[in-house]
Amino acid sequence: MAYSDKVIDHYNNPRNVGQLDKSSSEVGTGLVGAPECGDVMRLQIKVNPETQVIEEAKFKTFGCGSAIASSSLATEWVKGKTIEEAMQITNTDIVKELALPPVKIHCSVLAEDAIRAAIGDWKKKNGVTEGAEVAQAVAAN
Amino acid sequence: MGTKPFCDACGKVQPPSPDIDYFAAFGLPRKLNIDLSALERSFYRLSRKLHPDVYAQATQQEQQWSLEQTSLLNDAYRTLKNSIARTEYLLKLEGVVLEAGKSEDGAAKESRVPADLLEEVFELNMQLEEMRMTRKMGEDDPQLRKDLEKAHIDFESQLAASDSNLQDLWTLWGTALDNEDTARKSETKDQMVALLDRRRYIRNLVRDVNEALEA
Ligand code: FES
């Protein structure tokens, strides 16, 4: 399979590999897997409690080149964004940026899932969504 | 158009029906418990009958059809003789999308990946990486090696267990099919999907642990 230059660049020089302190209340951790291939990805964000801006992001991926590139790109993208902005990132954006072929789309989905899981974890720790979600659920009924 | 490679009446080769499935190519029902030696025998018997030499004198059209039938037969055989490929193929025939690009229903997707398994997979991968790194520096960490050997045995047996669970599901599937029990059919399908998902992680781990231990 021919990887695009951008994939190769992220693969050879992955940005933000590593980990953040899982137990910190400012850190959200997303651990996700792709059942299609059995690959796993962990993405972590560190959020400023005042501004809700993601100040730090790290990842660790055991998987294919596209998954590594997708998660590397995802950490670059979320940094400096607020939680709400980061939620807007979709796998389609990643596919476009990295020019992923159709068989590699699930790798980008993994990265999107990881962002959402990390944000979800942070929200849960900080009691952010619960209220909003309950309110929404009530409103929907 | 029939599903058989040869015409019942005149015995001549027919073009493969466009919607033939691999089970039908062997005249089998869509069941997963397959007698592999019988499958092999039919494969050889049909291959011989379709062999290009047999068609050396035949019309162009017949030569073409016999080639198409042969390639269908080969694909079918390769898929059906492998227990995992066979199961995946059946699920696909039954409308299950295995390589879910993006599932509409986030919740359903999450439940496909058990969190405890993910943790385990991730941790083990970390250990494997550590082992590769110490190795690179020309060192050996006996404790790490011991852990990995233990993990190896553990995951091998998980793999074996999942294979035997899969066979149980095959039987359930066959029964549900015979009884035309739609509810049971879809329940069994879901169980097979979940099992295969889990199995993929375990298979990767077994492979990686093997590599690390052999290196
Ligand atoms: S092949 Fe599995 S994440 Fe890319």
Image (tube, coloured by chain):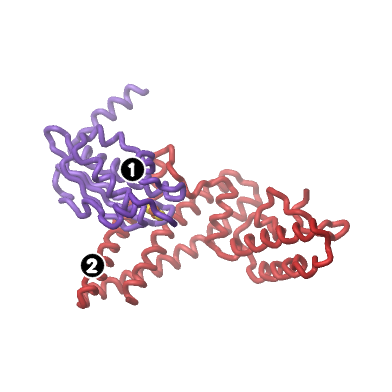
Q: Is residue B114 in view from this perspective?
A: no
SS category of the residue bearing label 2? helix
Q: Identify the chain drawn in purple.
A: A
Count of all numbered marks drawn on residues in the image: 2
Depth order, front residue of B176/B121 = B121
Chain of the residue on which disc 2 is drawn:
B
Decide: marks 2, 1 in contact (CB < 8 A)? no
Ligand 1 is found in which quarter of the picture?
bottom left
In the rendered image of this protein, which colour is used for chain B?
red
Q: Residues within 10 Å of mark 1 (few under 14, many from 20)?
A: many
Mark 1 residue type: Glu
In the rendered image, the residue lying farthest to the left is A50
Residue identified by numbered label 2: B130
Residue B213 shown left or right of residue A49 in the figure: right
Displayed quadrant of residue B139: bottom left
Depth order, front residue of B130/B164 = B130
Q: Residue at x 19, y 53 (%)?
A: A19
Q: Residue at x 20, y 74 (%)?
A: B137
Q: Estimate the spatial distance between the alpha carbons at disc 2 and disc 1, rounded to whole Å.
A: 27 Å
Q: Please state the horizontal and vertical placement of residue B90, each as a whole percent of the image.
A: 58, 53
Residue identified by numbered label 1: A112
Q: Residue at x 35, y 72 (%)?
A: B211
In the rendered image, the residue lying farthest to the front is A5
Q: Is residue B81 in view from this perspective?
A: yes
Residue A68 shown left or right of residue B91 in the figure: left
SS category of the residue bearing label 1? helix
